[in-house]
Amino acid sequence: MNSERPYRCFRPADLAIPVFVLVVVLIQGSPGTPPVTGDHPLLEVHSGDSTILHPMGTDTVLLVPGNLGPLQVQVAGSRARVLSSPCAGQDCVRRGWLEDAGDMSVCVPSGVYIVLTHGGDPPLDAVSY
């Protein structure tokens, strides 16, 4: 005679692990939540030791002093770009429009770079433990 009980595939205690994982996910929040940033877009213009913060939204052309001469930075609405530069390579001009927070254009020979920010802390690029 066989006195062993038959093997059951599913037991009520098997629900403990999925319920625990669900509770942990709900406590920590949604992993896809975007970072909270300020609502005032700014253009940061760095030239040598000076930094210029220019609010976006007004169409203008800024003259920024550089090592080789002045650069022209155009602001149009919520976008910005290097309009002209005295450097030979013109990579900063070919970069085109900066439209998203964190976009950057750099003119290495002139020692000037511009960054589009949204006023608060910059969003995280990556997190490592």
Image (spheres, rainbow, N blue to C red):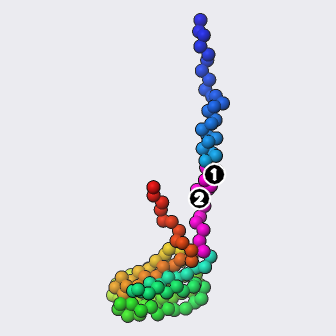
Q: Was residue 91 drawn as part of the magenta stretch in this picture? A: no
User: Which percent across, then down, holds residue 28?
Assistant: 60, 53
* Direction from residue 19 to residue 65 in the image, left or right: left
Residue numbers of the magenta segment: 25-38
User: Which numbered tag is attached to residue 73?
Assistant: none
Q: Was residue 37 drawn as part of the magenta stretch in this picture? A: yes
**What residue is disc 1 on?**
27
- For label 2, the SS is loop
Label 2 amino acid? Gly
In the foreground, 106 or 54 = 54
Label 1 amino acid? Ile
Classed neighbour count for the residue bearing mark 1: other residues with Cα under 10 Å, few (<14), some (14–19), many (≥20): few
* Direction from residue 32 to residue 93 in the image, left or right: left
Cα–Cα span, label 1 and label 2: 14 Å
**What residue is disc 2 on?**
32
Task: Determine if residue 43 is in view.
Answer: yes
User: Which percent across, then down, holds residue 101?
Assistant: 53, 74
Above or below, comparing residue 30 to residue 107 in the picture: above
> Sequence order check: which comes first, mark 1 or mark 2?
1
Residue visible at 60% across and 61% down in the picture: 33
What's the magenta bit mostly, secondary-structure-wise? loop
- For label 1, the SS is helix
Above or below, comparing residue 124 to residue 15 in the picture: below
In the foreground, 57 or 42 = 42
Assess whether mark 2 and mark 1 are in contact (beta carbons under 8 angstroms): no
| Foreground label between 1 and 2 | 1
